[in-house]
Structure formats: structure tokens, C-alpha cells
Image: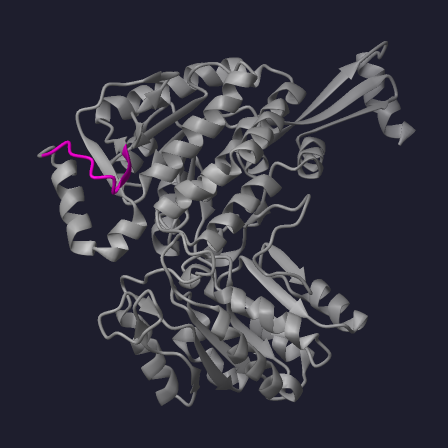
Amino acid sequence: MRSYQTFIGGEDLPAENWIHVIAATDLMENPLAGLRLKRTLDRGLSTEDTGAVAGRVARSTPEQWARATAAARAAQREWARRPLADRLDLGAALREIVHDRLDEFVDVLIAEGHPRRLAEWEVAGVLQGLQPETMTTLAALLERVEHVGGRELRLVRKPDGVVCLSPPQNAAASNSMLGVSTLFAGNAIVVKAPRSCPLGVAWAWRELVGAACAEVNAPPGLVNVLCGDPAPIMDHWLDSPDVDTVFYFGDSRRGMEIGRRCAVVGKKSLLELAGNDGLVVWADAELDLAARALTECFYGSSQICMVPKYAVVHPDIADDLIARVVKMLDDVRPGLPDDPEALLTPVLRSGDFFKLIEESTAAGATLVAGGQRTDHTGELDETGVFLQPTVLRVDGLARADELRVVREETFFPLLPIVVADTGDLQAMIDFIDANPYGLRNSLWAQDPEVIDEFCRSVHNGGLLKINDSHLGFAPTLPTHGGTGLTGGPHGEVNFPALRTSRLQGISIATGVTPRESIFDSAKAT
């Protein structure tokens, strides 16, 4: 059994209370026994390990929360003084460690309930963010030096200071690893593992990031890991003079409130909130590939933010495309997490799924496929915790604009395909741009003019993907960040290293006369 104590200032602290994680396969096969075992262990009524326990993480105390932010503050001053190249060495070291322990990383995510295919995608995203091409791009954005007229002119990003990170519950470990980028800018970090799924976060930051920090001789306290009640910990971060930036993942309503509270007390917020991604399919698209990209909606039962949540398709190819998507649903199936073919995950709060289908069909949408509960084998089961991959057809942009299933983020394996009234590209672009969320948007088309117009005109979203996997990762580009309800008023696609730092200009003159230089410099340009 993996066991992780609260980690502060380079030390494991004694623990009195623990949160236990039951292996997802055992929990799914015998949920009552698994929940009973977890409750008994968490209450300290037993120490028996039946083999069903994947690990445990210590519950941190308020005194430890304060100790963690103070340790980060002390370490940050030393770390920030190191040259950028030295700080980026941390990324190179971590890339090798993740690569060497990739299978173990996947196994930890599987133990927490991620299907293998989803876990492999998550780990691929972590590696992509550490690729040499991405690190080179990041280095160029963090520091630039030019020599002009007897001066060395520097544009450098200076760290905010101490960053406190609260990852989401749905993909906590992989998303939390975005916080590593903040270290490249010279920040120190406190990471809170969610109570509902603490193991992957604790493992990743202790086993992977911790090992990389040791390789580059990072100061103790650069990385601190704790677990506890989210609301009181957030209150501490907002009140603490040792916290400069709050890095929050979660739903838009809660995130916007945290952003507002940060602004009131003079702290920066970096928000990674909900997504409601759109995918446009034009008349000349390669339909098999477009259909395959649309089935990415169902990764993790669509309980991750960066999958396509709705499509807008040209009327000339709508019937053909929908038929291809439905045929591909045979490969989208539930299963135990270690099943290499499983893609769907349990949906524990599924009441709104059926309400959305009912209100959509009442408003004129057509249920094309799915719409029922199943067990992990795919058999229909009224008490099952899985939902069939479900496709709705919605005819007309105006009708779609009135449906919650299209205009709001859903966390169900539910894909509405909106058939445009006519082949009016601008109408489709306007529909995408009116989305109040803004994480990713995609286009499938071959006409260069259509592609150029889409890229030029779509302002919504942090990333635009053209004829590519919607949820895939691309070298040199960030993986997260967006506009509107996705990233807040200052949202954009982002490298966290840039969003947790501030631009500073530096001029170092040699042989320059101060007074004359005011005018000579201006005339020289």
C-alpha cells in the first residue's frame, strides 16, 4: 500500500488521520464492501489491509497549512535567484523520470478509477508539456536579451512568489502537474490533493516531482503537498501573507468567486474552469476522421473539460456523419479500469442526464443513440453507474441556441450534433463565438479559405484545432487555458509559468551619458 504523509519543507510530517483510497476495480466489483472498508479505515477503527487498499494520504492540520506556505516563501527566494537555464533543468529531469515511470503513473491513475486509455492520454499530456520543443518555446517567452546602442536590454518574467494549487477532482494528478511550470518561472508551490482522490496527486508530486527536485538540488520547501478540507484551506490561502497566487481548477461559479476574492485581497488568480467545446464539420471534411474526433467526446464519460461537447455540421454531410459516429459507438464501452478497451467511467450524479434528454427531445431534438444506464459489462441495468454513449440530433442553430444541452457544459457521455440550417460558414462561426465558455474549438475542413476564415474569425477559446484530435496535445502549444467562463476575465491559453510571473524590463548601459541618452536614444530610432 502506498502511503504519503503531509510533505512540508522537505520533510514528511507525523500524521494522525488518513484518507484511504480503495482500488477502483475492487470498489466497482463490490461497492458496499469497499465503502465499508474505507469508512472503517478513515475513522481509525481498523488498520487491516485486505489488498483492496490502493493507498492512503494523510489529512493535514491547520497548523500544517500555515507551515507549508511559510516553507514555500522561504524556499522561493533562493530558487528565484537561480538562472533560468538552471530552473528549466528541473523540467528536463522530470521528463526523464516521468518517461521511466510511465507505466507506474498509468497504474496509479487506474487504481483511482481512470480507464487505461484515459490514463495513457493524461500521462501523454504531462510528457508533452515537458518536451524539448515546448521547453525551448517557454524559455524564449520567459527571457529575451538584445543589445542596442550601448545597452543590454532584457525582458524577463519575474515570479509572483508562492503559488497555491487546487486541482480538480476529475483528473487531479495530471492536471496538478501543470503546476510544475510555475516552478520554471521561479515560484515555489503548495499543492492540495483532493480528499476524494488524493493518491495520484500525492504520488506524482512526491515520487516524480520530488525526485526531479532532488536531481537539481532544489531548496527544501520548493514543493509542499497537503490534503484536507477544501474551503478552510482556500480561506487560509486567501488570508495568508505568504501566498501570492491561487491556481484553481473547478466549476465556473466557484472559480469566478475565488477570482473575485483574490482580487479583493490583492492576490492573483489563475483559473482553469469549465469547458463547453465546439467542433465544426464543413461539407468537404474527411468524415471518418471527423467522426473519430467527435467520439473523443466520450473519453471518461465526458467528465473532463477538454473533450468536444457539441458539434455544428454542414447540412450536406449531416446524415452521413451522424451515421458514422453512431457506428463508432460500438468501440466506446464501459469496463473495469484495467480493461484496455474500456473508455467510459461511472457517472454517479446522473439525474440531469435524463432531464437533458427529455427537455431536448421535447424541444424538437432527436435521440439518435444511447440514453440508458448500463453496468460495467455494457448490459442495460436500471441501477447501473454507467451511461450509454448518447447522440442527439438538433436541427437548426436557433433551436440549438435555446437548449441547455448545447449551451451549457455537461458532464455526461452526451453529444448533441447541431445540423446548421444552411451552408453559411459565418453563421457557424458566430454560433461558436457566442459560446460563453472558451477552452478549445475544432474545425474539420479541406478548403484553405474556410480554414483561414475560421482561424481569423473565431475569437472564442484558448486553442483552435484544425483537422486534428480535439483533445490531443501539440508540441510548443499550451494544453490549458481559455476565455469566458473557462478562464475568467483575464483568461487565455496559457503556460502557467507566464501566468504566475510578471514582465520586467531591464536596461544595462555601457558608456552612455545619462542626460544625452534621453534624446540620442529617441533620435536613433
Residue 458 lies left or right of residue 53; in this view the side is right
Q: Quadrant of residue 423?
A: bottom right
- Residue placed at 48% from the left, 27% from the top? 209
- Residue placed at 16% from the left, 54% from the top? 32
Asked whether residue 81 is drawn in magenta, I would say no
Camera-nearest residue between 149 and 404: 404
**233 over 332 or under it: above or below:** above
Toward the right, the furthest residue is 524
Residue 33 lies left or right of residue 54; in this view the side is left
| Residue 429 showing in the rendered view | no
Q: Which quarter shows the C terminus?
A: top right
Q: Position of residue 160 (x, y in %)?
A: 51, 28
Asked whether residue 48 is drawn in magenta, I would say yes
**172 over 356 or under it: above or below:** above
Q: Which quarter shows the N terminus?
A: top left
- Residue placed at 52% from the left, 44% from the top? 123
Query: Which segment did they paint magenta?
Result: 46-56
Toward the left, the furthest residue is 45
Q: Position of residue 494 (x, y in %)?
A: 58, 44
**99 over 322 or under it: above or below:** above
Q: Please name the colour scheme applied to the rendered image.
A: one colour
Q: Quadrant of residue 37?
A: top left
Q: Position of residue 318 (x, y in %)?
A: 60, 85
Q: Position of residue 517 (x, y in %)?
A: 84, 18
Residue 396 lies left or right of residue 241; in this view the side is right
Main SS type for the magenta part?
Answer: loop
Residue 237 lies left or right of residue 14; in this view the side is right
| Residue 313 showing in the rendered view | yes
